[in-house]
Structure formats: C-alpha cells, structure tokens
Image (tube, helix red, strand yellow):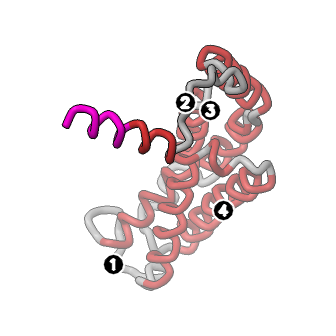
Amino acid sequence: MRRQIITIIAAGLLAAGCSGESGNDKPEPKATAEATAQAAAETRSAAPALSKEWETKLDDAGDKGGEGVCTEVGSEACVKHLTQLTEVVYDVEAAITEAGADTLYPRSMKHIDEVEAASTAFVEAECKGSTDNALGDSACAGYAATLLLGPATLSMTMTTDELSAR
C-alpha cells in the first residue's frame, strides 16, 4: 500500500511538471522584493503633486463668496457662489484625469463624485430661487453644505492621497 501511495504521488508530480531540477532560471524572492520596492519608489517619485498646484486655487474659491453669502441657500448670490465652487472642483478632476493620476487620488476622486452628486441633487430639488431654504435642516441646505465645503475638503483629501502614496 505504501508503495502505491508513493507511486501515485510521484506520478502526480511528474504530471504536474515538477522535476528535480534546481530551478535556477527563476528569480530569487529577495531580488524580486528589491525590484518591486525600487519600482514603487520610482512610481512615488514620478507621481504628480497636484495638491501644491491646486491648494491655493481651492482655498481662494472658498473665500470669494463673502461672509453670509449662503444664509439663504436659494438666493442668487449663494447659487452663483456654489456654482463657482463646483466648477473649481471639476477643474481639479480634469487635472487629475489629464495627469493620468486617477488611481493616485482615490479619496479625492470619491470626494469629487460626492460634490457632483450634491450639485445634481441641488438642481433636481429646485433649490435655486426657493424662499424656504434658509441654511438649516432642509435637504437643499445639506446639498449646499457639501458644495460649500467641497473645495476645502478636496484640498485636504488630495494631500492625504499624496501622503498615502509615499
């Protein structure tokens, strides 16, 4: 019985292509790990640092609205300000895509999607011009809050993505 088991195992190994050769043609694990580490380091050093370029633009966009601009979410001034903020966020999305860095900015791209969803919801809820949308607990106020915080949050998220890639 023991001989049959050994014969079956040996036949199985031969059928699988295993042999007694040393396998010197395969890279050693240490060399592979070093190559992987070096490739990762090169990718990090080549990764764009878009946050440096966009931080000031995102911060400036948030400052343009003036104090109390969105006290009434449906007001003309608030809608104009929210539109400008959203456009800057979309500009960052375009810059990330043009740099081919979508995978380097996963949190940022998710945040951009959230801003886009809030913008779409704001429009679909017909928040523009609505008189009962004082900043508070309304759905429109929630969308507006996401849009108001969009650029500042995106600035921090981009930095986080870049630090995580190192």
Residue at the left extreme, as displayed: 1
Residue 24 covered by magenta stretch: no
Q: What is the x, y in percent for residue 118?
A: 46, 68
User: Which of the two discs, 4 and 1, labels the residue nearer the N terminus?
Assistant: 4
Q: Quadrant of the N terminus?
A: top left
Report the residue at 55% width, 47% height from top: 106
Tell me the element at label 1.
Answer: loop
Q: In which quarter of the image is the C terminus?
A: top right
Tell me the CA gap for discs 4 and 1. 23 Å
Q: Do the residues labelled 3 and 1 touch (CB within 8 Å)?
A: no
Tell me the CA gap for discs 4 and 2. 29 Å
Dot 1 crowding, Cα within 10 Å, few <14, some 14–19, many 20+: few
Q: Which region is colored magenta?
A: 1-9
Residue 84: image tag: 4
Q: Do the residues labelled 3 and 2 touch (CB within 8 Å)?
A: yes
Residue 164: image tag: 2
Residue flagged by tag 2: what amino acid is it?
Ser
Tell me the CA gap for discs 3 and 4. 25 Å
Which residue is identified by label 1? 132
